């Protein structure tokens, strides 16, 4: 059962990580902390009362101050299906067990006084709703129908409880494992304990390097953006124009445009780039900044409200226009760089150092870093599809053709890529795959630590399981307390 539960948790957590649609939303229904008159941990119910409660509101379980409803499990299935996960091998008992664990984490997060930022949660909800509406063509009615809600306010309340409880659970899990480390000796012992015929197979891995050339933005384009922002500022201050409306119509920040450029910043948790924070935190309420630059373009910021460490700001971002001449010049430059590498005039690493505009890679030969593992190897089957498409036909050491691309900062850039090394699929080798083996050892230690914590906390927590679910096989002693 441990393996089945862990596999289920991996499936669900992987889907949640990949799904931008609803970010960190848990798929349980919104559960409020039970009020005193309904707190079963304080008022033991006799069998008649328990039966009546189950029939009325479908309580499948009580864990500490939280309840799990039968409908929660149904919603788990619906949400997984909506994300394309096959549910044929996922039993109702497995989903129920996962919900019990989520409530246990959330309950003890409250007991341990773990603090979560409610404004951050509400900001997350805005992003979730915006993403859904963008994908569904702006249909709030479809979103309400999916969650079975009659109004947008009811939906937001449910999403708030879902996100809050999910955040409590994740913060509790993080706290349990945050100090776990493995020593080199523990890694060796872990590896040596694996039977030789059961060693993990690591897929083909590539190391990829690139040279990037970005079209230069002219001073005229920069000045035009700055002057436009000054006009916006003057219109708001002198004529009473709406900053929010201007952000909706003119801002190049897609993420905040529909919200009138709104962000909530926290002094203790860096959220935006430093230049943005420095300006925002220097303003008085109601004040609009002068135009200033970041890597994303030029901004003006309005400070609307200060609440302790929280700053509600609106901003307008303008990205300077890129001229056709600049685009052609950048393309010509990278074509000449490619020709020199092919001719043998300089190596790829030398060309990256001399010509690449990508600061993150130019000083290490253009070598890309895997954002998930923080090393330079990319497992072929887990590689970003866009990157894979750009290098899939390359032999080792071969140069790609010049490719046009974009990122969060640059609307257009040109690049050439090469595969600098390839490690074919192989059984785990301690010396060659030490970092991967270390991660596996850490994961095993984390699982054991969480399992131990869970068993101890179940013993310390009021748990009531409905008769309908007592036949389930649980990863944990959930039924041992249910002796009344």
Image: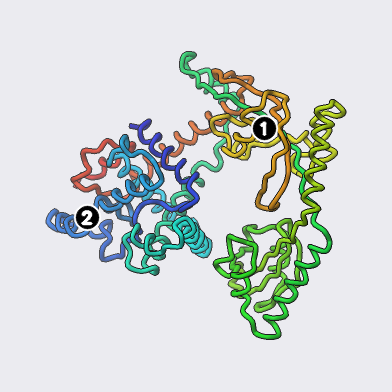
Q: Is residue 413 left or right of residue 100?
A: right
Disc 1, SS: loop
Q: Is residue 118 left or right of residue 86?
A: right
- Residue 432 image-quadrant placement: top right
Residue 341 at x, y = what percent? 82, 30
Q: Is residue 313 visible?
A: no
Residue under the image location 64 percent in, 30 percent down:
377
Q: Residue furthest top?
A: 196
Residue 333 at x, y = what percent? 82, 42
Q: Is residue 244 visible?
A: yes
Locate the N terminus and report the quarter of the image it occupies.
Answer: top left
Within 10 Å of disc 1 (Cα), the crowding (few <14, some 14-19, many 20+) is some
Residue under the image location 40 percent in, 34 percent down:
7
In the image, 349 versus 193, the foreground residue is 349
Label 2 – label 1 distance at C-alpha: 51 Å
Identify the residue under disc 2.
58
Identify the residue under disc 1.
376
In the image, 300 versus 142, the foreground residue is 142
Q: Report the disc number at residue 112.
A: none
Q: Is residue 72 left or right of residue 324?
A: left
In the image, 223 versus 438, the foreground residue is 223
């Amino acid at each position: 059962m441990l393996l089945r539960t862990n596999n289920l948790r991996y499936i669900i957590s992987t889907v949640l990580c990949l799904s931008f649609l609803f970010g960190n939303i848990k798929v349980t229904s919104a559960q409020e902390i039970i009020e005193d008159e309904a707190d079963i941990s304080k008022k033991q119910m006799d069998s008649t009362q328990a039966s009546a409660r189950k029939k009325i509101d479908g309580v499948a379980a009580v864990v500490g101050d939280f309840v799990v409803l039968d409908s929660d499990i149904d919603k788990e299935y619906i949400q997984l299906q909506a994300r394309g996960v096959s549910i044929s091998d996922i039993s109702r008992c497995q989903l129920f067990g996962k919900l019990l664990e989520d409530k246990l984490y959330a309950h003890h997060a409250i007991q341990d006084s773990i603090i979560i930022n409610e404004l951050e949660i509400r900001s997350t909800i805005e992003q979730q709703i915006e993403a859904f509406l963008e994908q569904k063509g702006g249909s709030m009615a479809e979103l309400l129908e999916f969650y079975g809600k009659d109004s947008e306010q009811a939906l937001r309340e449910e999403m708030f409880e879902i996100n809050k409880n999910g955040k409590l659970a994740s913060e509790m899990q993080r706290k349990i494992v945050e100090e776990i480390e493995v020593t080199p000796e523990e890694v060796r012992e872990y590896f040596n304990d694996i039977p030789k015929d059961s060693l993990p197979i690591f897929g083909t891995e590539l190391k990829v390097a690139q040279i990037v050339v970005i079209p230069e933005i002219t001073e005229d384009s920069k000045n035009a953006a700055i002057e436009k922002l000054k006009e916006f500022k003057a219109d708001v201050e002198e004529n009473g124009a709406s900053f929010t409306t201007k952000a909706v119509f003119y801002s190049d920040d897609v993420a905040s445009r529909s919200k009138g450029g709104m962000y909530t910043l926290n002094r203790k948790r860096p959220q935006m780039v430093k230049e943005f924070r420095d300006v925002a935190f220097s303003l008085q309420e109601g004040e609009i900044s002068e135009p200033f630059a970041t890597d994303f373009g030029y901004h003006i910021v309005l400070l609307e409200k200060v609440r302790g460490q929280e700053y509600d700001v609106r901003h307008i971002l303008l990205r300077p226009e890129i001229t056709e001449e600049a685009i052609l010049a950048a393309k010509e430059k990278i074509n000449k760089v490619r020709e020199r590498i092919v001719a043998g005039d300089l190596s790829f690493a030398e060309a990256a150092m001399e010509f690449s505009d990508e600061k993150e890679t130019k000083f290490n030969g253009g070598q890309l870093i895997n954002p998930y593992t923080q090393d330079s190897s990319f497992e072929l089957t887990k590689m970003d599809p866009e990157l894979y498409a750009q290098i899939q036909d390359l032999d080792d050491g071969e140069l790609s053709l010049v490719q046009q691309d974009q990122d969060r900062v640059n609307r257009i850039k040109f690049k050439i890529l090469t595969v600098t090394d390839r490690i074919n699929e192989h059984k785990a080798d301690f010396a060659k795959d030490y970092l991967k083996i270390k991660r596996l050892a850490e994961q095993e230690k984390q699982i054991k630590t969480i399992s131990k914590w869970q068993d101890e906390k179940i013993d310390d927590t009021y748990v009531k399981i409905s008769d309908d679910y007592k036949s389930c096989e649980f990863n944990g002693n959930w039924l041992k307390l249910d002796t009344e």
